[in-house]
Amino acid sequence: MTDYLNQPGSFPAHQAPSGYNPDAALFAFDKFLVNQKVLSLNSKYCVFNEDEKQLFYVDRPALKVKAHVGIYTDDSKSKMVLNLVQDSALTIINSSFTLFDESGKPIAYFKRQGWKSMLRRTWKILDATGSEIAIAEEDSLIKAILRRLPLVEIIGDLLRTNFVITRNGNVIGEFIRRFTLGDKYVLDLTQDRARTLDRRVAVALAILLDTAESR
């Protein structure tokens, strides 16, 4: 039986089964490639699946008082599927963001753990009810401390900032900066076999970890 959820756009409109949501198919992956566009005033990204088929176009306008990240189906920005908005422009150390779906309904919250992040960048991920569902933090406390030393300027990419995503103390994913020219990342959720983390939340988290942490 064909797994249509893993084949975005595989149905002609007149043949789509009842209840089929083509946008859901865009998130039906366990690995996403995130590439930041260079030489752009705004922070712009393209998100691909593992086969390098583009899934999303991401735009964060540079001149807004509060950070606002729109995740669209393509660069025409005609259809927004996710909207990530900073809760307050006045909060820096403990910044927080709300993730809205395409209908404007909150589906997740991201809260930076400011004081803890001074040693090891840490974000809590909460569901729509405010319950903690996961934590994203730098991959190693030792590496995190070393990254804050002048030595990092010498060894560069050897100490590139990566994150692990955990749920109830178990690693379910990683956000890794690739050894390539430019800012390119891999969001790898293959360890989350039960798909406990909503992939919409995971994709927004990946963008947030780069833009909010100014990596």
Image: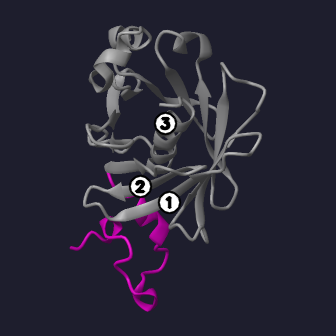
Residue for badge 1: 57
Camera-nearest residue between 149 and 35: 149
Q: Are marks 1 and 2 in contact (CB under 8 Å)?
A: yes
Q: Secondary structure at mark 3?
A: helix
Q: Classify mark 3: residues with Cα within 10 Å, few (<14), some (14-19) or many (20+).
A: some
Could you tell me the amino acid type at mark 3? Asp
Query: Residue at 77% of width from left, 40% of height from top?
Result: 65
Residue 49 x, y percent position in the rendering: 32, 57
157 is higher (above) or lower (below) than 55: above
Observer able to see residue 129: no
Query: What is the magenta range?
Result: 1-29
Residue for badge 2: 47
Camera-nearest residue between 193 and 84: 84
Name the image quarter holding residue 181. top left
Name the image quarter holding residue 202. top left
Q: Secondary structure at mark 1?
A: strand
Residue 144 x, y percent position in the rendering: 40, 14
Query: Residue at 59% of width from left, 67% of height from top?
Result: 77
Residue 83 x, y percent position in the rendering: 63, 52
Residue for badge 3: 210
